[in-house]
Image: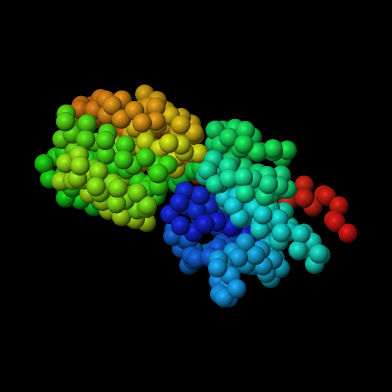
Amino acid sequence: MKIGIVLYPTFGGSGIVATELGKELAKEGHCVHFITYSQPVRLDIFQPNVYYHEVGKFDYPLFDYQPYELALTSKLVDVTINEGLDLLHVHYAIPHASAAYFAQKILESKGVRIPFITTLHGTDITLVGKDPSFEPVITFSINESNAVTVVSESLKQDTLNHFDITNNIEVIPNFIRHENYKLNPSTVCRKSEFTPNGERLICHISNFRKVKRVEDVLYTFAKIIETIPSKLLLVGDGPERLKLEQLCRDLKICEHVKMLGKIQNVSDVLNMCDLFILPSLTESFGLAALEALASSVPVISTNSGGLPEVNKHGYSGYLSLVGDTDEMAKYAVSILQDDDELAKFKKQAYQHSLNFGIETILPKYVELYERVCVEFLKEAPIV
């Protein structure tokens, strides 16, 4: 099957999932064409069956902002015709779903028919999508998609609550390939660079946006080190970084905190860690939490959005109310203060992550692709 995947190519969860999905499909022999404005951060274009098509920039003095949706629509038409695509799979509703719909209609006028699937990832529904200026387009694009998937039951309910959806929505959770998170002895040996006195090593990974509430990581960590000698690694970057640096100074914990910036292979960090903290205001799924679990790192997270579907309370870690840093610190200490307890939670974290292995999730996408193509071809072409 020839599949076009449209995504945001950045470090965000939707782009990472879309990239990894395409790579897995390519391993199965499908031809996967990535279509976006720059090469995705986790994409190896030398992998067999993988192709990358860049959406060109349009620089003209009349426009204050590039009309990206139009450029993307034109690229989708071009790639579909010249590469003979069978299916388009767009990740993140804005503006990918509407661009796919426009491309579909343009292609129909040229006698080419192709279905498109829209996968909703979270902030396209729970944050950006709530803006009244976007709502009509999002609702229309979702309803006109030939299939719609979401990454959690929580996000499905949010979508139904916020939009007038008449289309069927299927839940296909995010996934990981466990072999990508195997323990690397050389990486583990580096742990002593961050914990020279045998401290526990705690980690947080995100894009440092307000919704991630990274300041709560610092508040929680400040309480943890009152009892447990620990170090904290902050991986990522974003608009809240300056505030975090100041808060670190205000809490007088900077000597125990290291900001590593953006790292492409997060497993190198996670393999060193003893605990992962994710205090987000909301998460449609919580891919970073799943990556931690797959690395045998227990998770302390909030209980919002899809996180309870990923992090099993009392087994793979613990769940707390948003903003309750006292409870998060209490749970963290209960795991970290005893070697046997930590070892138990590490084992359970990995065991729980097996529910989201690529071997389980990929067949769901392949079955959906085949079903959508068959159903679409059964429909009478528009004359």
Name above or below for residue 342 compared with residue 53. above
Q: Position of residue 188 (x, y in %)?
A: 23, 47
Name above or below for residue 226 compared with residue 291. above
Which residue lies most toward the right here?
Answer: 383
Is 67 positioned to the left or the right of 185 in the image? right
Please, which colouring scheme is shown? rainbow
Q: Residue at coordinates 19% horizontally, 45% vertically from top-left? A: 249
Q: Residue at coordinates 46% horizontally, 37% vertically from top-left? A: 282
Q: Residue at coordinates 45% horizontally, 51% vertically from top-left? A: 12
Q: Quadrant of residue 327?
A: top left
Q: Quadrant of residue 66?
A: bottom right
Is 220 positioned to the left or the right of 147 in the image? left
Q: Quadrant of residue 252?
A: top left
Q: Position of residue 103 (x, y in %)?
A: 71, 61
Q: Position of residue 335 (x, y in %)?
A: 26, 28
Residue 219 or residue 318, whichever sits in front? 219
In the rendered image, is residue 53 in sight?
Answer: no
In the rendered image, is residue 91 in sight?
Answer: yes
Is 124 positioned to the left or the right of 180 in the image? right
Q: Position of residue 210 (x, y in %)?
A: 40, 44
Residue 177 or residue 332, whichever sits in front? 332
Q: Residue at coordinates 31% horizontally, 51% vertically from top-left? A: 241
Q: Quadrant of the N terminus?
A: bottom right
